[in-house]
Image (cartoon, helix red, strand yellow):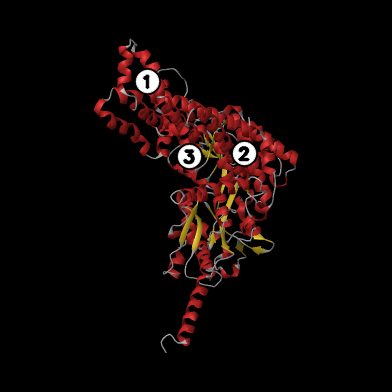
Amino acid sequence: MFLLSPPALTLLVFFFVPLVIMASYTVREGTFGVASRTFSLDSFRTLTENPGFLRLLKDSMVLSLQTSFFAILLAYPVAYFLVFHAGKRRMSLLTLLIVPAWTSYLLRILAWKLILGSNGVLNYTLLNLGWIDEGVPIFLYSRTAVLITLVYVWVPFAALPIFSSLERIQRHLLEAASDLGAKPWESFLRVTLPLSFPGILAAFFFVSIPTVGEWVTPTLVGGVDGIMYGNLIQDQFSRALNWPMGALLSMVLLVIVLVAVMVFNRFVNITEVGAYG
Amino acid sequence: MRNGPLFRLGIVIVLGLTLAGCGGTTVAQNTELILLEWSGYELPEFWEPFEAQHPEIEPKYSFFAEDTEAFSKAQSGFEFDLIHPCSSYWKLYVDAGLVQPIDTSRLSNWSGVYESLASQGNFDGQQFFIPWEWGYESILVRTDLVEEVPTSWADLWDPQYAGHVAVFDSGESNFVMAASVLGIDPYAATPEQVEQVKQKLLELKPNLLTYWTDYTEINQLVAQGDVWLAGQAWNDAYAALYDEGYEVEYLNPEEGRLGWLCGFGISANSANVDLAYDYINAALDAQSMANMGNAYYYGVANADAVPLLDPYFVELMEMGDPSILNDTVFYQSLTDEQRELFATIWSEVKAGQ
């Protein structure tokens, strides 16, 4: 009990109490002064009157699922190569994969702006190939741009848990499979893939949970159509100074993520998944 | 006598005085000066005389990037002596009791301040804010990329510019802009008119490439040629692109250019009021203000500073003629309800289809 109390206390003071304070803001009339001490369900009414708000939440969830899917799809072969074919160089290659993540997040997104922009590498190439007529930024300022950028950013983080789950697979299982006549693709599908599943699931959570509330990337490359639910929350706190509305939108997101995690938890033991992170 | 009653009494008195000193936010100190300020305005040449007057005092700055940020900081109990918000927020500070009335007779440079700007900082007969700098918000056009140069704010909706328009990511700015296109008074709009403005803003979305959020971003967008019409662009964006040789024009729309105004207020709890007055007066000084104008191409609140401005800049921004102040549609001080309404409508527009 005594050993547990410092972390429990930390959780209580720095996580649970702030959460309760934020939840309490959802039923306040305003952010400051008298209005902040007045009970009101205004935020709930605004939310129900604006189907656009929840539509953005749905869009954000779809985007986060797409991001996770593509990030895992790209990360898996990389992790597979590192574990089974990179030999002694696997650790240094893994480090190389992570190195871009050490530079500023903003810098990496701005780099994508240069690539996707109307004078960017991609447009320039397409223009010279004669595939497009005009220097319009067809890739930038769209939901696709947000997806591309997010996938790029999250691939290394998806690769890590997959890498560690593949590394735990005991090689003699694969040898046994081939001794018993399994072709390489059969042993991949029936041995490697199922055994690396916890890593895939960990990668899924690593990527999908932070991206569902993402707002920096949509702000920079999303344009008008790429606005996400996270932007809505950020606007309420910073520009609109409507903390009750911001708190309500945040709580809705939190509840949905928690429910999703709990549902997944019924199928897979999440603490075991966490061990691969 | 060691540890005698007198000695103990002495300790009690010393302790008492020390504690009294600690709690002394209301005691006049004038030992330091804390400013809540926009980054970029801290340069000593913008408040030159203060340094000569108080060489021992080094002003401390806490920077903010948006008015909302400064307002929430002030509301949350951040202790400051001077604050530099823009006029839209002035009434909110006054209503929340965050600032104190300013005795303009203590400011020797006050006489040069334009009356029409000064009156905006005056609430119920008392001067709460001292205007310092102002600027335009208008449409910046890449004349080499458009077939037809627009003439009004309403032209932002013209389909010929589809996908090449950007507007400032601000509820207030877009509400005021769309309302003036519709001929509606943004500050006295009925619920039906509010709905009209919202619909009008939703209709603008197909024409928009993005919402711009800062000076660097809009400059890049225009320079790259992605944005042909930059709505609510500031003086400095135009000046910078013009200087770089881009073919740009800064419109004088039929509905008028929008105008913003910012200035200084003194905290209601300031313990350094005398220093605050000296700082404001130093900032109002004709040379200090001209230094700011020449550095950022913003308008000056003190008419005496105009002769000291770079003639090139005066011509570019039409600063020589005071009547320009009357043709500019200045943002008005908002009530809390108006501020919330504009912000909510903008969220709904951004989330809407």
Q: Can you give x and y, in whole percent of width and height, for residue B34 in the image?
A: 49, 62
Q: Which of these two is toward me, A123 or A222?
A: A222
Q: Residue at x 56, y 57 (%)?
A: B74
Q: Nearer the viewer, mark 1 or mark 3?
A: 1
Q: Element type at marker 3?
A: helix
Which dot marks residue B347?
2
Q: What amino acid is labelled 1 in the image?
A: Thr
Which residue was labeled with disc 1? A192
Q: What amino acid is labelled 2 in the image?
A: Ser
Q: Does residue B83 appear in this view? A: yes
Give the CA separation, mark 1 to mark 3.
Answer: 47 Å
Q: Element type at marker 2?
A: helix
Which residue was labeled with disc 3? B217
Q: Can you give x and y, in whole percent of width and height, for residue B149 in the image?
A: 56, 33
Give the CA separation, mark 2 to mark 3.
Answer: 21 Å
Task: Point out the residue furthest to the left here.
Answer: A88
Q: What amino acid is labelled 3 in the image?
A: Glu
Q: Does residue A124 appear in this view? A: no
Q: Residue at x 45, y 87 (%)?
A: B4
Mark 3 neighbour class, 10 Å CA radius: few under 14, some 14 to 19, many 20 or more: some
Q: Can you give x and y, in whole percent of width and height, for residue B329 in the image?
A: 64, 47
Q: Which of these two is toward me, B329 or B340?
A: B340
Task: Point out the residue furthest to the front here.
Answer: A1
Q: Which of these two is toward me, A137 or B68?
A: B68
State which quarter of the image contains the C terminus of chain A. top left
Q: Element type at marker 1?
A: helix
Q: Tell me which chain the residue with mark 1 is part of.
A: A
The quarter of the picture where residue B193 lies is top right
Q: Can you give x and y, in whole percent of width and height, for residue B134 in the image?
A: 56, 52
Q: Tell me which chain the residue with mark 3 is part of.
A: B
